[in-house]
Amino acid sequence: MTARLPLSTALSLVGARRTAAGGRARLVAAGTAVAGALLLAAAAVLRVPAVAPWNGPDRRYSDLVAESGLRPGVVSGILLLVVPTLLLAWQAVTTGSARRAAAQRALRLTGATTGDLRRLAAVETGVAGVLGGLLAGPAYLLLWLPLGALAPAVRLFPALGAADLLGWAAVVLLATGGGAAAGAAGVRTRARSRRWPLALVLLAGAVAVIVLWPHVGRTAQVALFGAGLGVLVVAAVLLVGTAWSPRRARRLARSGRAEDVLAAAGLRALAPSAGRTAGALFAAGAALGVATGFLGTLGLPGYGDITYYLPGLLLTTAAAVLAMVAAVASLALAAADDLVTTARAQASLVALGSGPAFLERVQRRRLRAVTVGPVATGTLLFGVAYGLFGAGPTVYAVLLVIPAAGAAIVAALGAWAACAGVVRLLRPRVASAAAPTRLRVA
């Protein structure tokens, strides 16, 4: 019977490869910190004293959190923001690294079992989870300053107190356990995993929510609404990501241009990561489109003062931007790992006459193929849909297409510029991968 890997040995191995895995650990910690801060924000909203609409407004807080009928939507929206941040952390955990794969092969040769590798990965991500949980407190403070200490019209959070400290401690424990579990689950024993079955299960869960809705009470309906909305978001991320990346790769391959053909091959190499990025950006665009569509309907009669809706709009916009940053950062991590595994191919292209500028264009092409289109499509589709839903079948509804199209253009330009920034950051790695020394056989 093989002895289990001791915790002290696992910690020593994690410390020994801290430099190589530093970027991955920082992304796991960052995603966990933001998710923890959002959980603290949701708990803070629930502590706001609730008032019924007919009892008059609570002047100490925004009506979005003070009214009992509006608060569930705010809490559900905050919890939905957790999805892209955890997606970033999970992407960082599961992205394959050449160094990590080589280290695992070396450990297997020395007698390490799959269980030992899982325990090692659990310790590695568990440490990053502890750091992320500790950083969740300062991250929540950054949220509290604009939304808890300013004018009552936009105040969403109560004053800081002992409950926040208890919640912070709970977040640290959850982040540690969740990080360890994610690290252990990230050690794959099979080459590939399919996302379609999981997406179908999630869709079945959404159907179950719709069926149960009329037969449960008010409290259960609120819980079902939040759960169903979360299920639909995750399902959309999986389904859009699964369909978009392969389709774009096929279209690029059929163009016949050398740059597009190489970008298509790169997309196939990044298929899981590119798919998750495309799905996350589609969901981010959907959030931005909803905010834009709602903003366009505020000119209709009956909506009142825009300051009433300002906190919700700011929160939704922040969610969209956060999701975009998380998705692009996760794709950048995957692209950096891919440059390590394809270094010999990159060096061969340079030896055959392709310069570094050509390699950078290929990188930009494949990154933009799964970022610009999804975010623009999600923004335009949901912006127009929400605008039409809010305005109804009127002439004014046609005008709502204009802000939705403008938001889609801005989101696409943001993704375009982000890809250029990622390629610029990867420039030293591209140069290292294309160095002539990479052509050595031994």
Image (tube, rainbow, N blue to C red):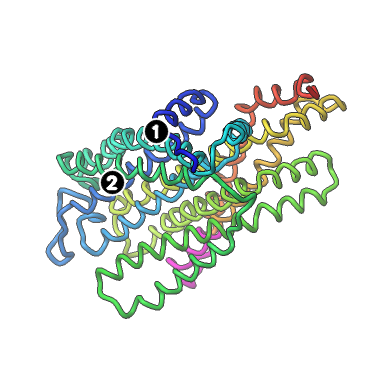
Image quarter of residue 155: top left
Position of residue 16 measured from the top left corner of the image (x, y, whole percent) = 49, 23
Residue shown at the point (40%, 65%) measured from the top left: 228
Residue placed furthest toward the left:
55
Residue placed furthest toward the right:
352
Near mark 2 (Cα within 10 A), the count class, few <14, some 14-19 or many ≥20, is many
The three-letter amino acid code for the residue at tag 1 is: Leu
Position of residue 248 measured from the top left corner of the image (x, y, whole percent) = 71, 52
Could one spot residue 418 in this view of the protein? no
Q: Is the magenta stretch mostly helix, strand or loop?
A: helix
240 vs 152, left or right, is right
**Pointer 2 residue:** 41
Could one spot residue 386 in this view of the protein? yes
**Which one is nearer the viewer's eye here, 208 or 313?**
208
Residue shown at the point (24%, 64%) measured from the top left: 69
**Pointer 1 residue:** 7
Q: What element carries label 1?
A: helix
Q: What element carries label 2?
A: helix
Q: Give the range drawn in magenta.
A: 381-398
**Which one is nearer the viewer's eye here, 336 or 251?**
336
Residue shown at the point (78%, 40%) measured from the top left: 262
The answer for how far apart the CA atoms under marks 2 and 1 are is 34 Å
Image quarter of residue 343: top right
User: Can you say which quadrant of the picture contains the C terminus?
Assistant: top right
Position of residue 109 measured from the top left corner of the image (x, y, whole percent) = 61, 34
